[in-house]
Amino acid sequence: MKEFIEKLKGKEIFVGRESGTDRLLVYLSINGQIKVVHIGNPGSVPKSVSRAIPNQNKAHISIKIDDNGNINVSNLKPENVTFVNGSPIVSKRISEDDKVELGADHYQLPLNILLQSAQKLGQPLEPNPTPKPEVKTFNITHLEKVWNDFHEGDLAIKDKQHKMGLQQRIPIFFTIGAGALTSVAWSLGWGEWIRIVSICLTGIGLLLMIYFFIQSSKFNPVRETDKLREDFQNRYVCPNPECHRFLGNYSYTMMKNQFKMECPYCKSKFKE
């Protein structure tokens, strides 16, 4: 990345989402002219990333590279949200190893690719460009199971949460029934056995309430969901060991269509 930074010293790069195609749009001024480059496939950038409109000088963030090669990222509007290493920022100096994410969906900015693309808008890095490296191809069949495990696990947590909510209502019916029997027994002068039944129903209701309370205290849906999502994000990644980045919260089928069988970060090809 250092060679790209060297060519971009003194430049300010603007980054955002291209309206209509939802690709990453990068623009900067070269010799007084606005130069634009697009990164990624259509639909690869979520709507939470603000639009980049060169002729209106609008974007989600700007990246300034000073004469010493320092990189500074600035969030351009209060409505935007930008993260560096998981923390929201307004403006922050970063290094090439920092993770920059845009929008509430935490779209991870491919910083290396972005700077390389921006540098190409100016003078070429070398008089004679070197041959492009061979594009690697990786099998992604295993990612279908990773997605299915995550999806089924998420549904199981929601189903359990729903069932526990219904179970916690059961004691109410015993308590209501006990109260109704007691009222009828007192008004009609029924025998003592009706009162005994009422007391039993109340006791059963209390026991069920305690039981369901203990069961619910053992189940934390928020923690279970976080654990499931963390495992998913660690497994649903580009199979290229040199990349290994999270491919986003898309279903396996949608992911294939979204990325066109190509990693949006390292550009490795995918196959089944």
Image (cartoon, grey):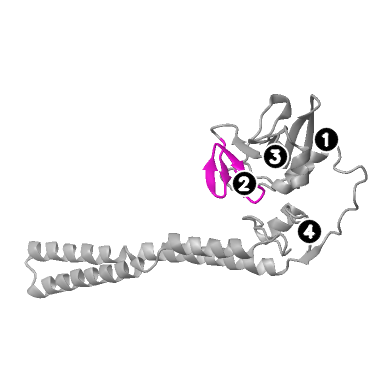
Q: Which mark is residue 268?
A: 4
Instruction: Return the mark for residue 214.
Output: none
Q: Nearer the viewer, residue 272 or 128?
A: 128
Instruction: Residue 148 in the image: state x and y as whole percent.
Output: 62, 66
Helix, strand or loop status at disc 2: strand
Quadrant containing the C terminus is bottom right
Callout in the foreground (4, 2):
2
Which label sits in the foreground, 4 or 1?
1
Instruction: State which tag comes first along the sequence, 4 or 3.
Output: 3
Considering depth in this image, is 170 or 57 the residue closer to the camera? Answer: 57
Compared with residue 67, is residue 247 higher up or lower down, i.e. above or below?
Answer: below
In front: label 1 or label 2: 1
Asked whether the residues under the numbered discs 4 and 2 touch, taking CB atoms below 8 Å apart as contact, a structural biologist would say no
Query: Which residue position is annotated with label 3?
Result: 69
Residue, x 8% and y 61% (percent of image)? 187
Give yes or no for contact between labels 4 and 3 (Cβ–Cβ under 8 Å).
Answer: no
Corner quadrant of residue 192: bottom left
**Which of the marked residues, 4 or 1, is nearer the chain's N terminus?**
1
Stretch in magenta: 80-102
Crowd rating for badge 1 (residues with CA inside 10 Å; few <14, some 14–19, many 20+): some
Residue at figure coordinates x 36%, y 69% from the top left: 218
- Residue type pointed to by label 1: Gly
Can residue 206 be spotted in the picture?
yes
How crowded pointer 3 is (Cα within 10 Å; few <14, some 14-19, many 20+) is rated as some
